[in-house]
Image: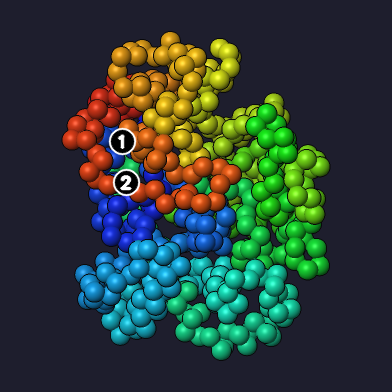
Amino acid sequence: MERQSGALLHPSSLPGNQICGTFGEHAFHFLDFLESSGLSIWQMLPLCPTHEDRSPYQALSVHAGNYLFIDMMEYVNRAWLSQEEVDNLSNKNITTHLSQKKILIEKLAIQFGSKASNQEKENFQNFCQQHYFWLKDFALFSCLKNTYPQSAWTHWPDEYKHRNKNALNTYEKQNPQAINTCFFEQYLFFSQFEKLKTAAKQKNILLFGDIPIFIAHDSVDVWAHQELFLLNDNGHPSFVAGVPPDYFSATGQRWGNPHYNWIEMEKTQYQWWVDRLQIQLTLFDTIRIDHFRGFEAYWEIPAKNETAIEGQWKPGPGGNFFHAMQKHFGQNLPFIAEDLGIITEEVTQLRQAFNLPGMKILQFAFDSDDNNPYLPQNHEANSIVYTGTHDNNTTVGWINSLNEDQKQKVLRYLEDATKPLHWEIIKLAFSSVADCVIIPLQDFLGLDEKHRMNIPGTVEGNWTWRFDWEHVEPNLQQKINQLNQRYSRNIKTRKQD
């Protein structure tokens, strides 16, 4: 990686009139903001469709895109929808909004045959052919979810739960319009994102994606590939993921995700993972892999247990997995390793063996001694430094939460403690030897704890934060540019020199 900088912002946090941000005008305006600030990276969270809690880390599909992000104004401008139809989308209730937006997408799908150009129709057919290996299952899963609302796939009738071929074929023939709408919805998502990616490339801005190592049990991927997960005869997990008890939790964390059947996956040279990563790499230039340490060893908890206490460490696929990925994606893998938490020497060796950048979080740097790996003097070049992540408090909120002793420890480290502390922390990140620095937009905007994206361990009020252009100070781009110039992170300027 070159020395460069970027911002962390999920598209859902973009401004706009809908219930969450979209790939519309504000997304392109944000690209302008990045470019004028000298920032060359836009990092996002997973873009997959979510459950009702809206967590992008518990998705309904690892391949599909969340149709919340589809910009409906594009089709108002093309006179395929009226302004009134889009304005009438509910912004108070996510479930109602989704159902109303689905109706509009269905209307667009019906009109597509008569209003689309021949080139657009050809593009749609090519998309369906290219993505058919996952699209059909996703469409069936989505429609069955509507047929059996509020039910996980393990509670569907046996012929659907166990994927009886004749039953699924009959169901598909009985629901052609709903199936086609799912295909069309994904075409709209991928088409609009491709326009955004093209615009980013023209501005020399890289797009960083994010995937969790584990996936939700109630997902099309587990339903469609039950043999690749450790499930019992009824489709329920035999073991679930989590982490063991530690300083922060006496009972550990029981996440509930099913574990992979790595033995079965290895028989196909991890083709399921190749497919998963390949789709994401059509969207993004590089991908952060959440909970990277699970590839070296993972905490296996018997599903019957209510806590993580009685789990045990099990070896992951390790180097075999990444060698298989190199066969498909080349020696220089376009991945970033999320290596936070208690990391063993074996995990570090695995990351270094494949030259994957790790992560450094400044909010974790001041809770121990001078050997803390997150302190800037202990950073390494092949890493990405953050003030915080989507799971952290904002930096202003974090500073507000420190007791006096903790705050004094931070103040002693800063260059100028008389200036706004969150900007001094941002300056620390930019000055790091780490090749890349990425700052959550909330920190650039100086927002407090009310504006954090997620509070781990809670289920209410997360993933809904949005910014407004009024939050952006008139000289903000200039301030960020000055940091980029001072610490040699402005790629565009360096290339001109």
Residue 270 x %, y %: 68, 53
Relative to residue 89, is residue 374 drawn left or right?
A: right
> Is residue 77 in view?
yes
Q: Where in the figure is residue 39, as x and y percent of width and height?
A: 32, 36
Foreground pick, 258 / 384? 258
Task: Answer whether labels 1 and 2 touch (C-beta < 8 Å).
Answer: yes
Q: Does residue 317 lie above or below 376 as drawn?
A: below
Looking at the rendered structure, the kind of residue marked 2 is Phe
For residue 393, side relative to residue 144 (left or right)? left
Q: Does the rendering let one see residue 413? A: no
Q: Is residue 426 above or below residue 214?
A: above
The residue most toward the left is 474
Choose the circle earlier in sequence order: 1 or 2: 1
Coordinates of residue 65 in the picture (x, y in percent): 47, 61
- Residue, x 62% and y 39% (percent of image)? 292
Q: Which residue is mark 1?
A: 445
Query: Measured along the vertical axis of the image, is residue 141 above or below residue 382?
Result: below
- Amino acid at pointer 1: Leu
Looking at the rendered structure, the secondary structure element under dot 2 is loop
Q: Which mark is residue 467?
A: 2
Residue 485 figure quarter: top left
Task: Indicate the secondary structure of the residue bearing disc 1.
Answer: loop
